[in-house]
Image (spheres, helix red, strand yellow):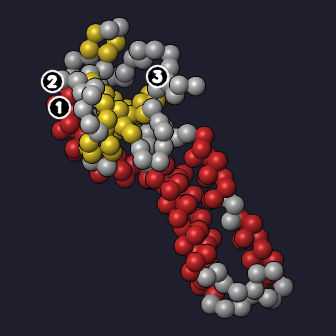
Amino acid sequence: MITKPPGWIFLSGLLAPRLLVLYWASVPFWYGIEMFVLGVFILGPLIYIGRLIAASLQGQVSGRPWRWLVAPLLVLAVILAIVTNAPFQLRFAISLPEMEAYAATVKEQSRFDAPCEWVGLYRVCYSAPHYVESEPVPGSAYLGTEEWVIDSNTGFLLVPHGEPEAETVDDEYRHVGGRWFGHHGWDNW
C-alpha cells in the first residue's frame, strides 16, 4: 500500500508523457496513437488515485499532504486542457499571424520541394493553392505541416470565403477559426 507521498522522480516521470500528449493535442487532427497514450498515461494514474484513497481511508497516509495532490492535479489539468482543446487553440493563436503572412506568399507560388520551415509554431513542408476540380481557388492557401513525433498527413487550409470543397473522398476538413480550416488527408493505409 502507498503510505508516503510521491517523490520528485515519480512526479517528473508523470509529467513527461502528459507534456507529450498536450503537444499531440495541438495539431488539427488527432491520431489513434494519441488516444492510446491518452488512455494509458492520463487515465492510468487513476489506479494511483484509487490506492491513495484506500490508504487514506485506512489512516496509512503520511508525509506532506500537498504532495499527495500533485499527481491527481496533473491528471485533471491535462484532461481539462484536452477537453477544452486548449493546446491546439493556444498553438494556433500564437502561429496565426505568421501563417497569414506565409499564406499570402503561397498565393503567388507553390512550394513542393522547398525545405521545411517554421511558420509560427508549425513546421510547414509543403504549400500550394487549394485546388477544386484541377483549378486553383483564388485567394486560397494550403500549408502542409509535419510534426517531429507524429507521422501525419495534416495541415491548414486558408479559403477566401465559405467552406473548402474536398478534392477527393480522402480529404477531411474542420473549421479552426476565421478563414482557416484544419486538413487531414489520406494516411497511406
Q: Give the amino acid type for the residue marked by disc 1 in the picture.
A: Ala
Callout 1: SS: helix
Res 33 quadrant in image: top right
Res. 120 visible in picture? yes
Extreme-bottom residue of the structure? 63
Above or below 138: residue 16: below
Above or below 79: residue 65: below
Question: Where residue 171 is drawn, which disc sits there?
Answer: 3
Identify the residue at horizontal 62%, vertical 59% (top origin): 42
Res 111 quadrant in image: top left
Q: Earlier in the sequence, mark 3 or mark 2?
A: 2
Task: Quickly name the residue at label 1.
Answer: 104
Res 54 quadrant in image: bottom right
Above or below 67: residue 51: above
Question: Marks 2 and 1: in contact by CB < 8 Å?
Answer: yes
Of the pair 90 and 128, the residue shown nearer to us: 128
User: How far is disc 3 from disc 1 in space, using C-alphas?
Assistant: 23 Å
